Image (cartoon, rainbow, N blue to C red):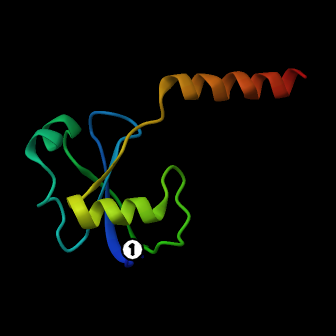
């Protein structure tokens, strides 16, 4: 199924760096389960965007985000795994030092 474009509100977690909730702006946080909101902390508005299936996102695929919002009412973006961050730092160090 081709996903429809949406106006999306993105919230940043007050508890965990790199954790974000994407929701349809018109529904806001209504569909987000209460246990998730409790773990997420205070949702801090980050940005509003017109999300289309072709839009480039830094750490997610737009069609997957749109599908999750359509089916669940939200998309949760977790912070990158610590191991991945460590791998990237080591790779950057290797490039700098040949």
Q: Would you say 60 lies left or right of 37 here?
A: right
CA neighbours of label 1 inside 10 A, class few (<14), some (14 to 19), many (20+): few
* In the image, farthest residue toward the right: 98
Image quadrant where residue 42 sits:
top left
| SS of the residue under disc 1 | loop
Seen from the viewer's position, the closer of residues 41 and 57 is 57
> Can the viewer see residue 71?
yes
Find residue 19 and report its horizontal and vertical position in percent. Answer: 36, 41
**Where, quadrant-wise, is the C terminus in this rendering?**
top right
Q: Would you say 90 lies left or right of 1 here?
A: right
Q: Would you say 65 lies left or right of 59 here?
A: left
Image quadrant where residue 83 sits:
top right
**Where, quadrant-wise, is the N terminus in this rendering?**
bottom left
Find residue 63 and report its horizontal and vertical position in percent. Answer: 44, 65
Q: Is residue 46 above or below residue 76?
A: below
The residue at 36%/66% (across/down) is 66
* In the image, farthest residue toward the front: 1
The residue at 37%/78% (across/down) is 4
Find residue 11 and report its horizontal and vertical position in percent. Answer: 30, 53
The residue at 33%/75% (across/down) is 7
Q: Would you say 50 lies left or right of 72 here?
A: right
> Can the viewer see residue 23?
no
Please state the total of marks drawn on the protein image.
1
Q: Is residue 19 above or below residue 84?
A: below
The residue at 74%/26% (across/down) is 91
Give the residue pinned by disc 1.
1
């Amino acid at each position: 199924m081709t996903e429809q474009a949406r106006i999306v509100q993105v919230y940043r977690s007050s508890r965990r760096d790199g954790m974000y909730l994407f929701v349809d702006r018109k529904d806001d946080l209504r569909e987000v389960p209460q246990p998730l909101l409790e773990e997420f902390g205070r949702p801090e508005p980050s940005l509003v965007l017109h999300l289309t299936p072709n839009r480039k996102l830094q750490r997610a695929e737009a069609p997957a985000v749109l599908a999750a919002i359509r089916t669940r009412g939200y998309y949760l973006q977790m912070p990158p795994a610590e191991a991945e961050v460590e791998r990237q730092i080591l790779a950057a160090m290797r490039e700098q030092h040949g």
